[in-house]
Image: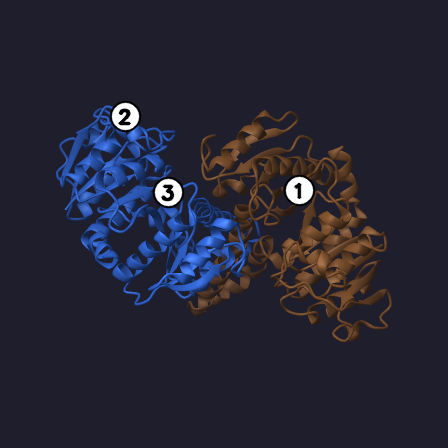
Chain colours: A blue, B brown
């Protein structure tokens, strides 16, 4: 298995990839190709199972879709091109979402009958069974047809990867009733309801997504991104507040805090983006993982691990089979 | 002080208002007028400082703006009409947001120069100083001009109510850079940046709202509602998960859990909608509080309390002064 890592897209610079890559090839049976500035990646030269692919251009966070054609020697475009040509089995990038989506759509293309790929995140629920949320930000604005399209991708994903027989699909909206939300969401509701072969369970409000009643939650890229980041931010704020409250209380509370540390840590991990690493750009012909731009070393490692699993379990092929 | 309560809008029926109203007139120096079905509210007859105003129509959750003109004898329209005519100093309603916003805009009108009212929620941050989030769902879709308008309301509110000298205003968006988001958000960014007398601090991503770097966060009603409900849902999910983890661990952890109970309870209250009660429809000439449709008795009580404070502190007049 050959994994391609775009090492130039992170807010933290290429250095954040060095240790995770070294560790990963020790822990797992995979070859890693790392794309980026030769000097910045010098520490990876000579390491077994690692190949540094020197590139001269960088996709900036501001770069959108058009930059894909312009920056042919960027680490991102080179990595995705190698994926297209079979020199790699999957790509991880922390670079511009818009550029990465375009690179994927232009080079490895969307899988039939998908017209627009979406970023798919898995989010845990009360029951322990997670749901797939998409799109979480590949598209800043979406049509109703694109949301229907996300439902098809999400369904295929949950069937293929998690063995859910007839995935229950919810539409993220600001109210339960069919007429709630703007016109696009009202239209998406109608399309989802009328669609054959989709187990549409109606609108789902953002405070109900953890109920375990939905296997797939469809969102326009804007509000899907708001939901995902709000979950992340709230979790971090709350866990931090609990830690502060415990540490700034009396001696006895501190003892109590020590005792429960393990139990709370497990819950903290549930919604910690450093734990889940990245998100799959779903609906493409080959696997690409988008990692957070501000990923720390742990998150980078977990994003590579996520790609490894997606490749090993042949997720993309299974989803394509479902789509057909 | 006379507070008007629309008792028919709640998902839980009028009975959820009985105990909170009884308790409130015992605890605070206020007269309460309760609008709704005479029989359902019979338990409030004869209680000192409480007047039941019998109404025959009910604004349903499905009812939108048009129903305001049609259902003249609904508890909601009667309450807002009495507010308009000076028979009450403020209104609490858990009914249809769209209908309530219309009733407010049609009857008590928006305050100059506001063209569109927004629902304003206060949300806590790391620093202990909360920020005002608006709109959180009064408008399912918003123009860039309306978002600018929300900034003006939010600024006036934070100056008037919390004494913030030059409120820092953030625009809720899916990325930091000016070009992020859909066209409406790009345009809103430009308008906010160019506006005189607005301390615009740029785009704020949903995971950064708790940073304490913003006094006002502006959102289109759809994503503002998603953010608010996502915060609520995540908090409830996490606190529930922590409770489960503590209770399903060994004996020692349970002891630890008992010790830290007080500290955790404080944090739980931070983001519990039952605690903060309702949200102000900001930008109107008179105070109207929108309570959650699924409010429990504690939440109803806190919504009445919120209205009481808004009236007592003359919030609406102070905001109007700032707006002028």
Mark 1 vs mark 2: tell me if same chain: no
Location of residue B200 with respect to A213 vertically, above or below: above
User: Disc 1: which chain?
Assistant: B
Q: Mark 3 points at which residue?
A: A138
Residue at 42% across / 40% down in the picture?
A: A140
Which corner quadrant of the image does residue B144 belong to?
top right
Q: Distance between the residues labelled 1 and 3?
A: 31 Å
Q: Name the residue under label 1.
A: B116
Q: Mark 2 points at which residue?
A: A70
Mark 2–mark 3 CB contact (< 8 Å): no
Marks 1, 3: nearer the viewer: 1
Q: How far apart are marks 2 and 3 (CA)?
A: 20 Å
The answer to whether residue A13 shows anywhere in this view is: yes
User: Disc 2: which chain?
Assistant: A
Label 2: state its secondary structure: helix
Which corner quadrant of the image does residue B113 belong to?
top right
Mark 1 vs mark 3: tell me if same chain: no
């Amino acid at each position: 298995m050959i994994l391609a890592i775009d090492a130039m897209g992170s807010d933290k610079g290429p250095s954040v990839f060095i240790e995770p890559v070294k560790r990963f090839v020790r822990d797992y049976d995979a070859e890693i190709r790392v794309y980026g500035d030769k000097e910045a990646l010098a520490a990876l030269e000579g390491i077994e199972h690692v190949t540094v692919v020197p590139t001269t251009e960088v996709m900036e966070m501001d770069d959108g879709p058009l930059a894909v054609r312009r920056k042919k020697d960027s680490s991102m475009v080179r990595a995705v091109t190698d994926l297209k040509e079979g020199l790699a089995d999957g790509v991880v990038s922390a670079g511009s979402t818009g550029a990465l989506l375009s690179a994927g759509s232009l080079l490895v293309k969307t899988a039939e009958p998908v017209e627009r790929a979406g970023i798919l995140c898995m989010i845990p629920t009360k029951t322990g069974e997670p749901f797939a949320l998409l799109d979480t930000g590949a598209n800043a604005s979406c049509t109703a047809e694109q949301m229907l399209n996300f439902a098809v991708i999400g369904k295929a994903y949950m069937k293929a990867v998690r063995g859910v027989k007839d995935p229950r699909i919810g539409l993220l909206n600001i109210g339960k009733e069919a007429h709630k939300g703007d016109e696009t969401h009202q239209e998406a509701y109608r399309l989802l309801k009328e669609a054959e072969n989709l187990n549409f369970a109606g609108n789902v409000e953002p405070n109900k997504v953890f109920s375990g009643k939905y296997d797939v939650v469809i969102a326009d890229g804007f509000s899907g991104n708001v939901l995902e980041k709000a979950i992340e931010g709230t979790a971090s704020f709350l866990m931090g507040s609990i830690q502060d409250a415990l540490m700034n209380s009396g001696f006895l509370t501190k003892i109590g805090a020590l005792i429960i540390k393990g139990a709370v840590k497990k819950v903290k991990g549930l919604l910690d983006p450093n734990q889940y690493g990245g998100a799959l750009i779903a609906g493409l012909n080959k696997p690409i993982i988008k990692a957070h731009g501000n990923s720390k070393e742990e998150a980078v490692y977990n994003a590579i691990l996520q790609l490894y699993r997606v490749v090993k379990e042949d997720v993309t092929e299974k989803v394509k089979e479902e789509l057909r």
